[in-house]
Image: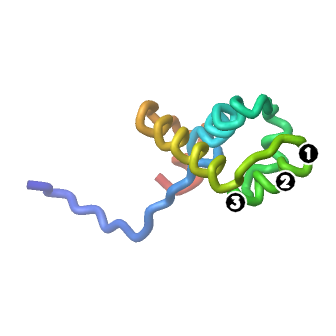
Amino acid sequence: MIEDKVDIKAAVFDLDGTLVEDLNYEAWQLALAPYEISLGIEEYGEYSGNPSLKIIEMMQKKYPVKINPSVLRQEKNQILMKLLGEREIAAMPYANEAIGF
């Protein structure tokens, strides 16, 4: 029996490096490796925050590799889900303070 009840008013899901460790960068690197595209952290910062299909569209302008956007998005998402299942997600410094815990 739970004696202390918590009245949850909201849930925050953040996986882009603001509140918790960003696994998207690693997922993109792994998904792009078969295309021989190496994504640096600075370049990733230019894409970060955009939807996957927009990121792929931006990459297609820079890299002369034939990429099926839907396939690459699916591959990247599968890799991300695998990483999320394998890793303990670490909070970024001061994340708890930022959301009031």
**Residue at left 45%, top 31%?**
87
Q: Is residue 71 above or below residue 34?
A: below
Which quarter of the rendered picture does the N terminus lie within?
Answer: bottom left
Residue 100 point in image, percent of width and height: 51, 56
Residue 23 appears in the picture as rendered: yes
Q: Are marks 3 and 1 in contact (CB under 8 Å)?
A: no
Q: Is 74 left or right of 46, judged from the image as shown? A: left
Q: Are marks 2 and 1 in contact (CB under 8 Å)?
A: yes
Q: Which residue sits furthest left?
A: 1
> Which circle marks residue 87 in the picture?
none
Q: Quadrant of residue 44?
A: top right
Name the residue type under label 2.
Met
Instruction: Name the secondary structure under disc 3.
Output: loop
**Residue at left 41%, top 37%?**
85
Q: Is residue 31 above or below residue 53?
A: above
- Sequence-wise, the earlier of marks 3 and 2 is 3
Residue 60 point in image, percent of width and height: 85, 49
Which residue was labeled with disc 1?
62
Name the residue type under label 1.
Lys
Q: Is 64 left or right of 23, judged from the image as shown? A: right
Name the residue type under label 3.
Pro
Q: Nearer the viewer, residue 42 or 55?
A: 55
